[in-house]
Image (tube, rainbow, N blue to C red):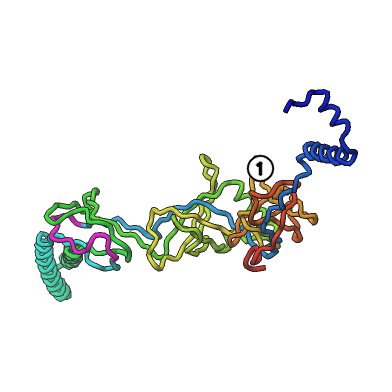
Amino acid sequence: MSEPNAGQSSARWRSAPPAFSAVLALAVAGLLAGCEKPASQAAAPPAPPVTIAQPVKRTVTDWDEFTGRFEAVEEVQVRPRVGGYVNSVEFQDGAIVHQGDLLYVIDSRPFEAVATQAEGQLSDARAKVELAKRELDRGLNLVQTSAVSEQVVDQRRQALQAAHAAEMQAEGALKAAKLNIEFTHVVAPITGRVSRHLVSPGNLVQGSDTGTSTPLTSIVTLDPIYVYFDMDEATFIKYSRLWFEGRRPSSRDTPNPVQVTLAGETKPSHDGTINFLDNRLDVSTGTLRSRAVIKNTDLSILPGQFGRVRLIGSAPYEALLIPDVAVATDQSRKIVFVVKPDDTVEARAVTLGPLDEGLRVIREGLKAEDRVIVDGIQRARVGAKVNPHPAQAPAGGKS
């Protein structure tokens, strides 16, 4: 069969029924319309879900935080009062010792010999006193009969006084000798934790009478314990202003409370009170040395440790608080994301206060009725809608 030529095909197209041509035109038009539909008319994604909560309103008190170092209330460097060879060490290194406990024993034999000699000298002095008394009594009897002169009586009276003086000197020498014997037993002057022994048995130690006594060990008290910290000048001025306004008592007159957090802890574990403020600022650092006394009943704190000291810094006041995780940083600003009534997101600049029981105080920028995004911040976009859901529990504990 021969193929139709071009003229035949064109004739068939022209001779097609009108209904078929209309259907074909509608199909082509629909195809073109589908290709020209804007992408913006596609189905929009659903609004992202976020968790919201209103700020908690409650009475709070500001606390200022400082870095402190613990020191013992009492510390003693144990040194011998007398010199000699060490016979024994009577304590365990690092143990708790009580006042009066024996620590060292020094050879006492040389001092015992001196005490024996002093006893002999005292006996001789007392015998001379008795002799001088009898001679004076005899002279007083003889002077009445003019057998001796008044001059002889005066001489015998002076001899008795000299004998008494020699007796007192001998008694003092004996007491000193006995004290030296007592000092050969070195005892703990205070109750506390003792350090290691610095001198072993058999070594010669120098006493305090030589001016360079040998250190033996040291003892520190543990309960209570001091914590020293430095307060900057601006904080001191703030406290002074609050005191003048009657909104905070002065730590010089009132034992203001402190809380201490040790290294590795997330919240305060020890309580105490301020008991000392220095009388001037350190000109090299511009700080004021302060001290608090802390209870240490479990003996968990040692002198030399560091800790974070929280000092009451204001009078109680009403504040709005939100979870700290709801606060974001925008360059140098702190912001929170607030859901407006139309469920769109607004970034709100805020002024932060301290943390209080896990919540952040908001000084400026929020109202009590604001809906703050506390979870899902990464899904929120400023000006875009979100799907807010209330938090399961209030934003903070107490209201």
Q: Taking 282 as reference, is 215 left or right?
A: left
Q: Taking 163 as reference, is 261 left or right?
A: right
The type of residue carrying mark 1 is: Asp
Residue designated by label 1: 330
Quadrant hosting residue 34: top right
Q: Residue at x 49, y 59 (%)?
A: 260
Q: Taking 109 as reference, is 186 left or right?
A: right
Residue 51, how many percent across, how many down?
67, 58
From this viewpoint, which residue is outermost toward the top? 6
> Is residue 143 magenta-colored?
no
Question: Which part of the image, by quadrant, shows the N terminus?
Answer: top right
Q: Is residue 194 visible?
A: yes
Q: Residue at x 73, y 52 (%)?
A: 365
* Callout 1 crowding tier (Cα within 10 Å): few <14, some 14–19, many ≥20: few
Question: On screen, 13 above or below 199?
Answer: above
Q: Nearer the viewer, residue 185 or 392?
A: 392
Q: Taking 355 as reference, is 22 left or right?
A: right
Query: Which secondary structure, mark 1?
Result: strand
Residue 229, how many percent across, how many down?
49, 52
Residue 300, how many percent across, how many down?
38, 63
> Is residue 89 magenta-colored?
yes
Please report the bounds of the magenta region as a residue range: 82-96
Q: Nearer the viewer, residue 138 or 312?
A: 312
Question: Which part of the image, by quadrant, shows the C terminus?
Answer: bottom right
Q: Is residue 150 visible?
A: no
Quadrant hosting residue 311: bottom right
Q: Residue at x 66, y 61 (%)?
A: 315
From this viewpoint, which residue is outermost toward the front? 1
